[in-house]
Image (cartoon, rainbow, N blue to C red):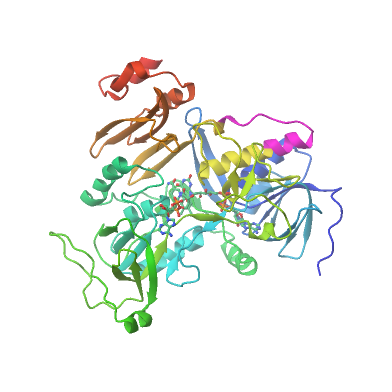
Amino acid sequence: MEAPCSPPTAGKFVVVGGGIAGVTCAEQLAINFPSEDILLITASPVIKAVTNFKQVSKVLEEFDVEEQPSTMLENRFPNIKVIESGVKQLKSKEHCVLTEDGNQHIYKKLCLCAGAKPKLICEGNPYVLGIRDTDSAQEFQKQLTKAKRIMIIGNGGIALELVYEIEGCEVIWVIKDKAIGNTFFDAGAAEFLTSKLIDEKPEAKIAQKRTRYTTEGRKKETQARANAGNVGSALGPDWHEGLDLKGTKEFSHKIHIETMCEVKKIYLQEEFRISEKKSLTFPRDHHDQSVTTDKEIWPVYVELTNEKIYGCDFIVSATGVTPNTEPFLCGNNFDVGEDGGLKVDDHMHTSLPDIYAAGDICTAAWHPSPVWQQMRLWTQARQMGWYAAKCMAAASVGESIDMDFSFELFAHVTKFFNYKVVLLGKYNAQGLGSNHELLLRCTKGQEYIKAVLQNGRMMGAVLIGETDLEETFENLILNQMNLSAYGEDLLDPNIDIEDYFD
Ligand SMILES: Cc1cc2nc3c(=O)[nH]c(=O)nc-3n(C[C@H](O)[C@H](O)[C@H](O)COP(=O)(O)OP(=O)(O)OC[C@H]3O[C@@H](n4cnc5c(N)ncnc54)[C@H](O)[C@@H]3O)c2cc1C
Ligand SMILES: NC(=O)C1=CN([C@@H]2O[C@H](COP(=O)(O)OP(=O)(O)OC[C@H]3O[C@@H](n4cnc5c(N)ncnc54)[C@H](O)[C@@H]3O)[C@@H](O)[C@H]2O)C=CC1
């Protein structure tokens, strides 16, 4: 039996989670309350720090991410104390969290930033891998060095990055949709990108550029993980640049895409032999020789809903994430979103008193701006962590603050297939129904530009390549100017639209 928590008189600001959301929140609290101790409780001793933060435009931001030992955070902010232990229980009525190391911590205000974990298609199958943190990425790399063929399930960010990066191994990519990259792109953008996948060898890998992983403290981390059974922080931009993603063979892309289907059944080798079913060879095109033969015996076989069966060395389930809410739910009556996240209002407050949440763990349940939506991304984890701290600080002195400007417009800048990709607002016309029009400009191998308009106003955009249009488009979406008079001139390459609107 645990000792009961004492009443919340001497409570601190407590933040749970050492990812971008938790660290940003703790840092902001430390700045707001320099004479108070801020407690950051995290299951792993390495924390994620945002460095080289750059506000590229009003809402677009870029930054590097560093994995650092938690002592570095304590050195930078002497009033932050990091506790390296997983939270195993929350007693919200008593304002208290219990950690794996047997201690309890009283809070006056708590922010839960425990992130999310991969939502695997077949939990517990040793041949199904998910990628989330440094350890799972390294495990994937290790398996890949022995692999001749793998299967990737899913059509979001991780799958897109992997299919482009993996070399020397056959990849069967299974997607539910007609076109690749459904979480980020429509069919037009997908076609633009697919040509890059098929026509071209991947560019030479540049040295690890943006995410720097320190090795200090890793032994300790493994130990903490073994005790707590928790995952580390999520990887982020350029996570694969430090990994050599090579299979056993010497060739670049060998990808076969199975569209509009899902996994029906996974067979282990012996199970498959007994079933007497037949598996397919890797589909080869006219100028291509398959490197695997009909005679291969695979450790695992996958039957798809289109009845095709392929054998492979292992399967990557890149099928989204589930918020890490488990240790916090028992005995606490949180409102939980359909996606399993803790619902938060426009002040990042959950449904329980004095408990806030930010980053991948939460579900934005406020009435959003017409051109913003939640996506579980690095940038939103930072923005939410920062804003949650501001709200906690204001509430603790009886004040309230306005919603941060970053929630006015969805803005994401990333890289796919070595192209710069900028997504703004309702970039895929999400929720706009049929009442919208699209303006497109595409130069094969160079750029793909799509503007989404509704009633003459720009609602979103996809910019692939070095288009230099992000700031102008951001302004056009924010100011909701009526663009009807400009028609297709808006994307005419001979018109300098920056001058047009300045
Ligand atoms: C492979 C990969 C690539 C990605 N690439 C991009 C990208 O290019 N751009 C982008 O914007 N986003 C990207 N993302 C998404 C991005 O990484 C996440 O949205 C973001 O990092 C979430 O931050 P977070 O702080 O909410 O959670 P996390 O980073 O998951 O941090 C959660 C923290 O909570 C701790 N924790 C968990 N449970 C407990 C507990 N019970 N007690 C105490 N501590 C606990 C964990 O140890 C961890 O420190 C990528 C994700 C992955 C997996
Ligand atoms: N460059 C970037 O911005 C990147 C962002 N990320 C983020 O990291 C997180 C994890 O990435 P992903 O796992 O790729 O998630 P995701 O949410 O981006 O994509 C999940 C994909 O899996 C598919 N899917 C879901 N269930 C399925 C099933 N049972 N069978 C087949 N397909 C299924 C969905 O249709 C979707 O295409 C996400 O929040 C993502 O946004 C990841 C990599 C890169």
Residue 318 appears in the figure: no
Please tell me whether residue 290 is drawn above or below residue 78 in the rendered image.
below
Residue at 70 percent across and 60 percent down: it is 330
Residue 238 locus on image (x, y percent): 43, 49
Residue at 49 percent across and 32 percent down: it is 371
Q: Which residue of the protein is positioned furthest toward the front in this rendering? A: 434
Residue 157 locus on image (x, y percent): 41, 50
Residue 330 appears in the figure: yes
**Residue 176 falls in which quadrant of the image?**
bottom left
Q: Quadrant of the N terminus?
A: bottom right
Residue at 40 percent across and 23 percent down: it is 455
Instruction: Tell me which segment is drawn in magenta.
Output: 390-405
395 part of magenta stretch: yes
Residue at 79 percent across and 39 percent down: it is 35
Residue 475 locus on image (x, y percent): 45, 23
Q: Quadrant of the C terminus?
A: top left
Q: Decide which of 434, 112 is in the foreground and name it.
A: 434
Residue 281 locus on image (x, y percent): 23, 70
